[in-house]
C-alpha cells in the first residue's frame, strides 16, 4: 500500500526528486494536511491585522539594526559571555565547527552526546562527523529522533518528521526499538520519552542550537515545547551551543517582539512551553547545570550573503518555517526534494550562500513567485525579490562577476545567443517581418523537441497566419 | 589569521561606508495589545494555562500545603521534592509534620551527580516557587537557584508551582522592566507555560514529552 519513495536515496537533481515526490500520494497527503493546519494556526494566532503588521515591521527593524552593527554585537556578545564564564569559539566552515565540537568532547573523554533541536548542527552534519569518531550523537527532539532512527534528514525545520504518519512511526519503533507496534500517538511519545531519558542521564555532553543570542546580557535563548532542550542544556556536565553568526540581537527587550513573532508564526502558539535563557555555567553554590558552557559561532557562507546589502536581508531569518508552511511548491514536493538542510523558500535563498549555486542550481527557479512566503515572513524578508536576484546571479557569465557563491551556475552561451537573437528580432522591423513570413510559411518545420517544455506538453506550432496578418485583413475588411 | 578575525573583517568590509540603523524600538507594540484590568489578569493567565492542560487552583496562603497533600494523595504518589531553605518549603514541612502526610519529602541538597539515577527515575513530584506570572501568554517565570535547582522543575512527572497573585504582570516586556532583568540574569531564567508537550507525530498533541507530564499551578491570594 505504502508507495513512499525513499527520497533521501535519490541523489539526482531537484527536478528528479520532485517527480518522485509528486507521485507519492502518502507523502503529499501528509504534507497537505500538516501545512493546512499550520496555516490555520498561524492565522488564528494573529487575529488583529494591525497588530500583526506593526509587530512584523518592528521585527524587521530589530533584525536590520542588529545586522547593521553585527561585528560589534558579536564582539559584545563574546565579551559578555566570556565574563559570564562561557567559552566562545568561532568557525568559518562547518568542518571547523565540527572540529571544535569534537575537541571539546574529546577533552571530556566523552562518548555520548544528546542533542536538542539545532538546524546549524544539521548544516554541520555533526551526527555523522561524531559517529565517524566513535561518538554517539543522539537527537532528542521527538521528530528529530524519529528521523534519525530511520536514517533520514528532517523534512521541515520545525516539524522534522512531518512527512511521516503515525503508522510509519509505529512500524519504525517496532523495527528499531523492538517495542510492540502501537498506533497510539501518546504511547509512541512515551516510548520516546523512556528511551531518551536514559540517554539524558548517561550523556557526557549536551548540544543545542540558539534562537536568539543577546549581546547586552550575554544570554542564549532557546524556545521549545518538549523539554528536551532544557534537558540537553542542563543534565550533561558540558553544554555546547552551536549557532549562526546572524542570531545575535542587541538587547534583551529586542527578543520580546521576536519571540512573539517566532512562536505565533511557527506553530500558532502565544508562546512555547519553555523559553530557556542561559547566561552561564553552574556557579560555585549551584547544584546542577553544566560545569562548562561553550558557544560555537558559525559563518558557513553567511558573511558572503552579508556582503551584499540586498542579499543581507536573508540573515533576518528567525527560522520559524512559516514560509514553507505557506509555499505551494514545498507543500507539494515536501522538504526532502530540496536535497539540503533548509527546505522551502528560506532554503532557496540561504542555501546558495552555504553550498554554492553549482550544488543547488534549481533552487532559485523552484518557485512560482506567488509571494506567499514574503507575505507571511515575520521579519519581512522579501523572499520573492531575493529569488529573482538569485535567478540573475545564477545566469551571469564569468565576465559579469556574479556575487553569489558559484554564481553563473546556469550560465549558458547557447541561451545567451538565443536571447540576443530574440532581441535583434524584436528590435528590427524588417527582420521581424521576414521571420514571421518564414515561420508561418514553413510552420511544419518547427522543432518537435523544445527541451523541458515538450516533456509534458506538445510542441508549439506557428499558426498558418500571423496576428499581424489577421489584423491587417480584419482592418481592411472594416474599411470597405 | 584566526577564524574570528576573518569573520569580523569580512563583516566589517560589508558594512564599509554605512552607519548603524537607529534604535526605533516602539514598546507600545508589545505592551498596548497586552494590557488587562487587574481583576482580569488572573483570569487570562488561568484560561491560557488551562488551554494547554495546566491544572490551576486559587487558594489562600494558609490553604495551599493541604492542597499539595491532596494532589499527591489523589494521584497515589509516594514522594515530593521540595526546598526546605525557602519560606514556602518551611511552610510545607510544617504542614507535613502536623498532618502526618504520607508522601516522603525529598530534598535537593547535593549536586546532581550524587543522585542522578534517583532524581531521573524515582522522584514523583516537585514543588517550586516562581518569581511571577505573565498574563498575556499564560506563563510562569522561574528563577532557579541553589534551593530550587534547574532540574527540579523538569524531571519529576508532576510539577507544582506556587504563584503569588500579586506578582502576575500583564506582559513579558512589563515583567522584564519591573524585575530589571537586563541588570543581571541568573544562570538559567525560565518561562514555563504548561506541561511538556509535542506535536511531532502527525501534529497530534501529546503531553509529557521529556519534562513534566502534569503542571499544577497554585495561585496564592494575598489575603
Image: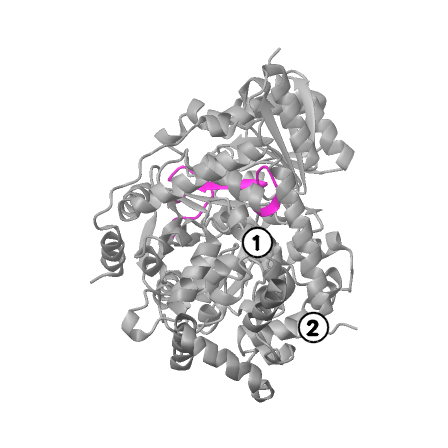
Check the image and name the residue furthest to the bottom.
A445
Residue A62 position by quadrant: top left
Specify the quadrant that holds the C terminus of chain A.
Answer: bottom right
**Label 1 sits on residue:** A158
Q: In which chain is the residue bearing label 1?
A: A
Relative to A463, A426 lies left or right: left
A281 falls in the magenta region: yes
Instruction: Tell if the residue under mark 1 belongs to the same chain as the one under mark 2.
Output: yes
Between A160 and A52, which is closer to the camera in this rendering? A52
Extent of the magenta region: A266-294
- Colouring chosen for the image of the structure: one colour
Q: Secondary structure of the magenta portion, mostly?
A: loop
Specify the quadrant that holds the N terminus of chain A.
Answer: bottom right
Relative to B67, A388 lies left or right: left
The crowd level at tag 2 (other Cα within 10 Å; few <14, some 14-19, many 20+) is: some
**Label 1 SS:** loop
Amino acid at each position: 500500500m505504502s508507495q513512499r519513495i525513499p527520497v533521501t536515496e535519490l541523489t539526482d537533481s531537484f527536478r528528479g526528486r520532485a517527480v518522485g515526490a509528486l507521485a507519492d500520494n502518502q507523502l503529499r497527503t501528509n504534507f497537505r494536511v500538516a501545512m493546512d493546519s499550520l496555516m490555520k494556526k498561524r492565522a488564528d494566532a494573529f487575529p488583529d491585522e494591525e497588530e500583526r503588521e506593526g509587530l512584523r515591521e518592528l521585527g524587521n527593524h530589530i533584525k536590520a539594526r542588529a545586522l547593521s552593527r553585527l561585528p560589534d554585537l558579536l564582539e559584545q556578545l563574546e565579551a559578555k559571555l566570556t565574563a559570564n564564564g562561557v567559552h566562545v569559539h568561532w568557525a568559518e566552515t562547518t568542518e571547523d565547527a565540527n572540529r571544535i565540537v569534537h575537541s571539546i568532547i574529546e577533552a571530556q573523554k566523552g562518548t555520548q552526546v544528546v542533542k536538542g533541536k539545532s538546524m546549524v548542527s544539521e548544516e554541520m552534519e555533526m551526527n555523522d562527523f561524531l559517529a565517524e569518531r566513535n561518538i554517539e550523537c543522539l537527537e532528542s527532539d521527538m521528530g528529530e529522533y524519529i528521523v534519525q532512527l530511520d536514517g533520514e534528514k528532517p523534512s521541515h525545520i520545525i516539524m522534522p518528521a512531518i512527512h511521516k504518519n503515525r503508522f510509519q512511526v509505529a512500524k519504525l519503533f517496532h523495527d528499531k526499538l523492538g517495542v510492540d507496534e502501537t498506533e497510539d500517538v501518546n504511547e509512541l511519545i512515551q516510548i520516546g520519552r523512556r528511551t531518551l531519558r536514559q540517554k539524558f542521564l548517561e550523556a557526557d555532553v549536551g548540544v543545542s542550537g540558539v534562537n536568539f543570542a543577546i549581546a547586552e546580557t550575554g544570554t542564549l535563548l532557546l524556545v521549545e515545547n518538549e523539554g528536551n532542550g532544557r534537558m540537553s542544556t542542563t543534565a550533561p556536565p558540558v553544554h555546547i551551543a552551536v549557532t549562526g553568526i546572524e542570531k545575535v540581537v542587541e538587547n534583551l527587550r529586542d527578543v520580546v517582539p521576536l519571540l512573539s513573532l517566532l512562536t505565533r508564526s511557527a506553530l500558532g502558539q502565544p508562546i512555547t512551553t519553555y523559553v530557556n535563557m542561559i547566561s552561564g555555567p553552574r556557579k560555585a553554590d549551584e547544584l546542577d547545570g553544566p560545569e562548562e558552557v561553550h558557544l560555537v559561532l558559525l559563518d558557513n557562507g553567511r558573511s558572503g550573503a552579508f556582503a551584499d546589502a540586498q542579499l543581507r536581508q536573508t540573515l533576518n531569518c528567525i527560522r520559524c518555517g512559516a514560509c514553507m508552511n505557506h509555499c505551494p511548491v514545498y507543500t507539494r514536493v515536501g522538504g526532502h526534494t530540496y536535497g539540503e538542510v533548509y527546505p522551502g523558500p528560506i532554503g532557496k535563498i540561504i542555501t546558495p550562500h552555504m553550498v554554492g549555486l553549482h550544488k543547488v542550481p534549481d533552487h532559485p527557479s523552484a518557485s512560482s513567485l506567488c509571494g506567499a512566503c514574503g507575505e507571511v515572513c515575520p521579519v519581512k524578508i522579501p523572499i520573492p525579490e531575493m529569488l529573482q536576484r538569485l535567478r540573475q546571479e545564477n545566469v551571469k557569465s564569468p565576465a559579469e562577476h556574479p556575487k553569489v557563491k558559484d554564481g553563473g551556475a546556469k550560465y549558458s552561451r547557447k541561451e545567451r545567443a538565443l536571447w540576443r537573437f530574440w532581441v535583434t528580432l524584436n528590435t528590427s522591423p524588417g527582420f521581424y517581418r521576414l521571420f514571421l513570413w518564414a515561420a508561418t510559411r514553413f510552420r511544419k518545420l518547427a522543432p518537435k523537441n523544445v527541451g523541458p517544455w515538450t516533456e509534458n506538453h506538445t510542441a508549439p506550432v506557428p499558426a498558418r497566419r500571423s496576428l499581424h496578418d489577421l489584423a491587417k485583413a480584419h482592418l481592411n475588411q472594416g474599411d470597405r | 589569521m584566526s577564524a574570528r578575525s576573518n569573520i569580523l573583517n569580512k563583516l566589517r568590509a560589508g558594512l564599509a561606508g554605512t552607519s548603524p540603523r537607529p534604535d526605533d524600538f516602539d514598546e507600545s507594540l508589545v505592551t498596548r495589545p497586552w494590557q488587562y484590568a487587574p481583576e482580569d489578569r488572573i483570569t487570562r493567565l488561568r484560561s491560557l494555562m488551562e488551554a494547554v492542560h495546566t491544572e490551576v487552583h486559587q487558594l489562600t496562603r494558609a490553604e495551599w500545603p493541604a492542597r499539595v497533600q491532596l494532589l499527591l494523595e489523589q494521584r497515589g504518589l509516594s514522594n515530593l521534592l521540595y526546598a526546605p531553605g525557602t519560606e514556602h518549603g518551611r511552610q510545607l514541612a510544617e504542614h507535613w509534620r502536623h498532618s502526618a502526610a504520607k508522601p516522603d519529602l525529598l530534598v535537593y541538597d547535593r549536586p546532581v551527580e550524587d543522585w542522578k539515577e534517583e532524581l531521573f527515575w524515582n522522584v514523583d513530584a516537585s514543588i517550586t516557587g516562581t518569581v511571577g506570572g505573565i498574563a498575556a501568554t499564560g506563563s510562569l517565570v522561574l528563577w532557579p537557584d541553589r534551593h530550587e535547582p534547574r532540574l527540579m522543575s523538569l524531571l519529576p512527572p508532576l510539577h507544582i508551582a506556587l504563584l503569588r497573585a500579586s506578582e502576575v504582570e500583564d506582559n513579558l516586556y512589563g515583567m522584564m522592566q519591573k524585575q530589571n532583568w537586563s541588570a543581571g540574569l541568573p544562570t538559567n531564567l525560565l518561562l514555563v507555560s504548561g506541561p511538556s508537550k509535542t506535536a511531532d507525530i502527525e501534529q497530534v498533541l501529546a503531553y509529557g514529552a521529556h519534562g513534566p507530564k502534569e503542571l499544577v499551578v497554585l495561585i496564592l491570594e494575598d489575603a
